[in-house]
Image: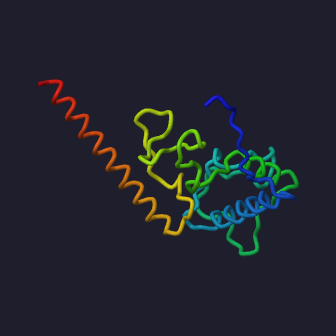
Amino acid sequence: MHNPVDLDTDCLTAAGDVDVKKHIWAYKVSRKMWRRMPIFRGELATTHPRFPVGSKAAVIEKADGPVISDENSRIEYSAEDPKAINQRVREILSTTWHSLGTCKMAPREKMGAVDTNLNVHGVKALKAADLSFPPREFWCEYRQYCVSNRRKGGGHLHQGAGAQQQRQRTASS
């Protein structure tokens, strides 16, 4: 492949930054919850935004239990703090799910990435056995389709290993 990567995930691009604002809200709520827990012993600075010096929302690296005990207590965020959270969200946001349908099962000439034997076009000895190439009409339960692909892939791998062992036996005879 010689074409430059041209991929726009359309992530964090909603009008008015509504998607980012949801992440900022979730970050603030989860922080408040953690700081109330009896097991709270501090925050790991590397996993949090870099708040401006002097911010009341700065990371507490060491604590001996909850630092917010009153139900009405809040972490005080300055006008600059959400900018730091926004930046951190944009730096670390990723999916926890495997993307469905990122490959096409078809001949290479038809822009396919995987053939019917699960071989990845253009890569020797690499098979794909997951949900990256669902059938056109996806009428079954996702997990079942993935399991069947893995079984098919395992069968091909087993056959390939058996053929390789046979070639090795023949060559050593």
Residue 43 place in picture, x, y as percent: 62, 53
Q: Residue at x 69, y 66 (%)?
A: 68
Q: Quadrant of the rendered structure where residue 169 is?
A: top left
The number of callouts visible is 0
- Given residues 141 and 90, the one toward you in this image is 141
Q: Residue at x 50, y 37 (%)?
A: 121
- The outermost residue toward the left is 173
Q: Please, which colouring scheme is shown?
A: rainbow
Q: Is residue 67 left or right of residue 166?
A: right
Q: Residue at x 64, y 28 (%)?
A: 2
- Given residues 17 and 115, the one toward you in this image is 115
Q: Is residue 158 left or right of residue 13?
A: left
Residue 40 place in picture, x, y as percent: 58, 61
Q: Quadrant of the rendered structure where residue 18 is?
A: bottom right
- Given residues 68 and 116, the one toward you in this image is 116
Residue 124 in the image: above or below residue 88: above
Q: Which image quarter holds the N terminus? A: top right
Q: Is residue 15 left or right of residue 9?
A: right
- The outermost residue toward the bottom is 71
Q: Quadrant of the rendered structure where residue 39 is?
A: bottom right
Q: Which image quarter holds the C terminus? A: top left
Residue 103 place in picture, x, y as percent: 57, 48
